[in-house]
């Protein structure tokens, strides 16, 4: 005679937990791989800011140092706020977009730094470090 010890909800929950553990392991692996690719791409773009032969790809496009670039900030802002119908005549990034990229890449740097710190603290605790901090 065959007797079922565990009822259906217990068995379903058990196998869903097994699937969840497999899923978490797979997602963590993908997360770590993606984090390394992300870091490599950020480093490559920052290096290209300083080494690119094209003036449109260099850091001077992100930081409006010249008077002419600074004068384009307000017209760019007016366009983005829908106060002007036509964008200012700029080839490449306008100064406002360039400054936005400065903020964005600074945030990327903070993200990479904090994830690295989480990985270092995990390593000190004897656990496997991960760039995602999990």
Image (cartoon, rainbow, N blue to C red):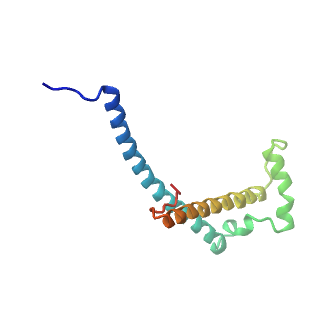
Residue 93 x %, y %: 72, 58
Residue 69 to residue 17: above or below: below
Residue 98 x %, y %: 73, 60
On the picture, is 14 further left or further right than 44?
Answer: left
On the picture, is 132 further left or further right than 20?
Answer: right
Q: Quadrant of residue 15?
A: top left
106 or 45, which is in the foreground?
Answer: 106
On the picture, is 116 further left or further right than 70?
Answer: left
Q: Is residue 1 visible?
A: yes
The structure residue drawn at horizontal position 77% and vertical position 65%, both measured from the top left corner, is 63
The structure residue drawn at horizontal position 30% and vertical position 26%, both measured from the top left corner, is 7
Q: Quadrant of the N terminus?
A: top left
5 or 122, which is in the foreground?
Answer: 5
Q: Quadrant of residue 13?
A: top left
Residue 62 x %, y %: 73, 63
Residue 16 x %, y %: 37, 36
Q: Is residue 41 visible?
A: no
């Amino acid at each position: 005679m065959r007797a079922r010890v565990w009822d259906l909800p217990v068995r379903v929950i058990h196998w869903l937990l097994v699937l969840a553990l497999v899923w978490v392991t797979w997602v963590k692996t993908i997360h770590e791989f993606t984090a390394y690719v992300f870091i490599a791409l950020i480093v490559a773009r920052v290096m290209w800011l300083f080494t690119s032969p094209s003036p449109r790809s260099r850091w001077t496009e992100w930081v409006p140092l010249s008077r002419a670039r600074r004068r384009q900030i307000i017209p760019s802002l007016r366009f983005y706020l829908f106060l002007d119908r036509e964008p200012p005549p700029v080839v490449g990034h306008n100064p406002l977009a360039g400054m936005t990229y400065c903020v964005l890449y600074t945030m990327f740097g903070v993200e990479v730094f904090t994830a690295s710190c989480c990985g270092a603290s995990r390593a000190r605790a004897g656990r496997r470090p991960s760039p995602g901090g999990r």
